[in-house]
Amino acid sequence: MNIILFGPPGAGKGTQSTLLKGQLGMTHISTGDLFRENIKKKTPLGQEAQKYLDNGKLVPDTVTIAMVEDVVKGLSQKDFVLDGFPRTRQQAEALEGLLKKNSLVLGRAVFLDVPQEKLMRRLTGRRVCEKCGENYHVDSKQPQNQGVCDKCGGKLVQRPDDREEVIATRLKAYEDSTQPLREYYRGKGQYVEVDGVGSTEQVFARIQKAVS
């Protein structure tokens, strides 16, 4: 079954998508990874995206959809999970056209539901080494010595975009943009909501049940 996995920042989409790839053999399609890969390889689509990014502009949906299509048209019958895309109704409609064009069908749109206070704790608790970039968390992944990276001894810092006031703005923007998307998939009978609170294994079991 082909699925979309979406949810607010900090909901655990990347972690769960990796499990779906590893345990169910699905192809994990992350638009963030596609951007980085195309830009790194300097593909025509990557160069097109870079032009917008260099000017501080959003990359048009047409470029993103084209990157996704490059992947899905080569999958044959292998199931895929789209991680964090689409984010708007317009993108969802474009994705539907892409899938029809390639004789593919979407099975479920899975929304990871996590209360805002828990998202806040997850996101504001992140710390990163300013030297090597290793990630830590004040709750779930603490260094051996407080404020010091285990790998290189660098200083652990909180990124500016992980501060509470920034996170609150991001979460509000996400909710505003994706509510129409949730209604879109509800109308198609493809929407399913999964409780994203609990251990990684517990959440994964819920996703498996939702898409089985």
Image (spheres, helix red, strand yellow):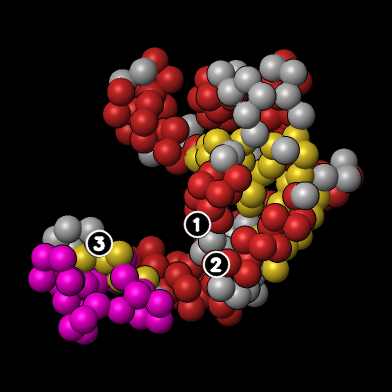
Q: Label 2: which residue?
A: 200
Tag 2: residue type?
A: Thr
Residue 167 placement, left or right of 73? left
What residue is shown at x 63% (from left), y 69% (from top)?
Answer: 202
Q: Name the spot of residue 140 as percent of width and height, x first.
A: 40, 77
* Helix, strand or loop status at disc 1: helix
Q: Residues within 10 Å of mark 3 (few under 14, many from 20)?
A: some
Q: Is residue 125 visible?
A: yes
In the rendered view, tell whether residue 201 sits above or below residue 191.
Answer: below
- What is the distance, in whole Å, between disc 2 and disc 3 at their CAs? 20 Å
Q: Is residue 164 magenta?
A: no
Q: Nearer the viewer, residue 166 or 71?
A: 71
What residue is shown at x 30% (from left), y 79% (from top)?
Answer: 142
Please, which residue is most extreme toward the bottom here? 146
Tell me where residue 96 sits by quadrant: top right
Tag 1: residue type?
A: Thr
Tag 3: residue type?
A: Glu
